[in-house]
């Protein structure tokens, strides 16, 4: 009888520890990694060729542009803001650059990147100057950038006639690895260093965690808000160069897809929508998760509409988990 009581007590304590772990911030942070591993194992079991090098390279190729767009979105979200213009900014930058330089070349690359950067600075400056929520300003700019892209081309894509420009993404400096992956990950990890090893990155996290405290320290919050949106625009500009080079054209109507997938990757990856927690490495996990999911769904035969429904559900679940984690954190702090 004594042994049974000890066993019951041990089982009870074990269950309590499991429940506490599931409710902890550590579990929330590890959840995207678990989901990525589970999806990878499921699709590999269903389709053994899923895990071969060729398919993985294909996933990374498709995911690279999403990675840069999502990385750009991560900076405003880390500050507790949001950028809803990332998709149409991508389209408008590529369309304007290709409209001016349809034969490709260095000027197209420079103009596309500069247009992205300027668009991000405009977004941040309007938010700071007008004192309006980022949601309102970037929603308005989303329609403005879309209008620019469609007015120049009437909604049609612009072909870019340049084999050297296509080589930027489709060539292979490293045999077997398309350049789009190489350039994309080099740029991504440069911004990882900026976000984790520089004063700018630390201040962006701090502002998202407690903006009023940062203001009391005498730090110019408006300046770093503009920088965060400038990073978003710059990464969009680089992404549009890689995308246009890969496709051989400037796409006019891909904006909504990149907005939805970019936001989903950031939130599913574990960056808090309230700001101050998460980061680019979590966004990387979110992008890989979405990439593996899309590829697996394509193999199963689920069309894009079904995939969007599933990702919408996943997006709501991720936000719900973030909100519950935030509430639990506040309860713990008040005890």
Image (tube, grey):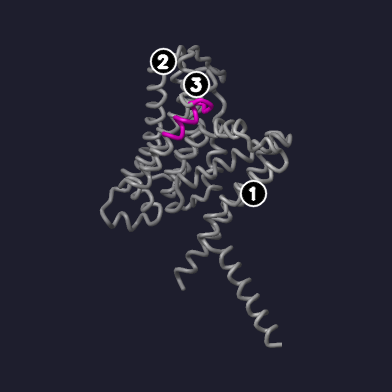
Alpha carbon distance from label 2 to label 1: 43 Å
Secondary structure at badge 2 equals loop
| 178 sits left or right of 16 in the view | left
| 236 sits left or right of 292 in the view | left
The answer to which of marks 2 and 3 sits earlier in the sequence is 2
Alpha carbon distance from label 1 to label 3: 33 Å
The residue singled out by tag 3 in the image is 171
Residue at figure coordinates x 68%, y 34% from the top left: 304
Residue at figure coordinates x 45%, y 53% from the top left: 277
Q: State the quadrant of the N terminus.
A: bottom right
Residue at figure coordinates x 37%, y 43% from the top left: 193
Q: Which residues are magenta?
A: 175-186
**Residue 134, relative to residue 217: is it above or below?**
above
Query: Counting other residues with Cα less than 10 Å from the Cα at mark 1, is it few (<14), some (14-19), or many (20 or more)?
Result: few
The residue singled out by tag 2 in the image is 105
Secondary structure at badge 3 equals loop
| 58 sits left or right of 76 in the view | right
- Observer-side mark, 2 or 3, equals 3
The disc placed on residue 234 is: none
The question of residue 306 being in magenta is answered with: no
The residue singled out by tag 1 in the image is 38
In front: 204, or 53?
Answer: 53
The answer to which of marks 1 and 3 sits earlier in the sequence is 1
Task: Please provide percent x and percent y for residue 251.
Answer: 54, 23
The answer to whether any part of residue 233 appears in the image is no
In front: 36, or 247?
Answer: 36
Secondary structure at badge 1 equals helix
Task: Please provide percent x and percent y for residue 102.
Answer: 46, 13
The answer to which of marks 2 and 1 sits earlier in the sequence is 1
Chief secondary structure of the magenta portion: helix
């Amino acid at each position: 009888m004594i042994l049974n009581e000890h066993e019951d007590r041990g089982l009870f304590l074990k269950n309590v520890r499991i429940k506490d772990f599931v409710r902890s911030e550590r579990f929330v942070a590890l959840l995207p990694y678990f989901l990525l591993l589970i999806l990878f194992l499921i699709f590999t079991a269903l389709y053994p060729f899923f895990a071969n090098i060729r398919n993985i390279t294909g996933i990374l190729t498709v995911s690279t542009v999403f990675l840069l767009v999502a990385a750009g979105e991560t900076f405003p979200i880390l500050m507790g803001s949001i950028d809803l213009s990332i998709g149409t900014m991508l389209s408008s930058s590529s369309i304007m650059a290709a409209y001016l330089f349809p034969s490709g070349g260095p000027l197209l690359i420079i103009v596309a990147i500069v247009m992205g950067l300027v668009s991000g600075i405009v977004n941040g400056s309007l938010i700071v100057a007008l004192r309006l929520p980022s949601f309102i300003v970037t929603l308005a700019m989303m329609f403005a950038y879309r209008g620019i892209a469609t007015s120049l081309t009437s909604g049609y894509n612009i072909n870019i006639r340049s084999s050297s420009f296509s080589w930027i993404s489709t060539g292979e400096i490293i045999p077997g690895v398309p350049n789009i992956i190489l350039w994309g990950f080099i740029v991504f990890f440069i911004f990882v260093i900026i976000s984790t090893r520089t004063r700018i990155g630390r201040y962006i996290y701090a502002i998202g965690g407690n903006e009023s405290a940062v203001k009391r320290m005498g730090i110019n919050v408006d300046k770093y808000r503009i920088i965060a949106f400038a990073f978003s625009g710059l990464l969009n500009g680089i992404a549009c160069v890689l995308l246009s080079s890969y496709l051989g054209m400037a796409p006019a109507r891909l904006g909504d897809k990149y907005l939805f997938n970019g936001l989903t990757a950031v939130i599913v990856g574990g960056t808090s929508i309230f700001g101050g927690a998460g980061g680019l490495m979590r966004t990387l996990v979110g992008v890989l998760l979405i990439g593996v999911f899309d590829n697996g769904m394509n193999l199963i035969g689920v069309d894009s509409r079904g995939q969007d429904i599933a990702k919408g559900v996943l997006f709501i679940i991720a936000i719900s988990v973030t909100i519950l984690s935030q509430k639990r954190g506040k309860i713990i702090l008040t005890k």
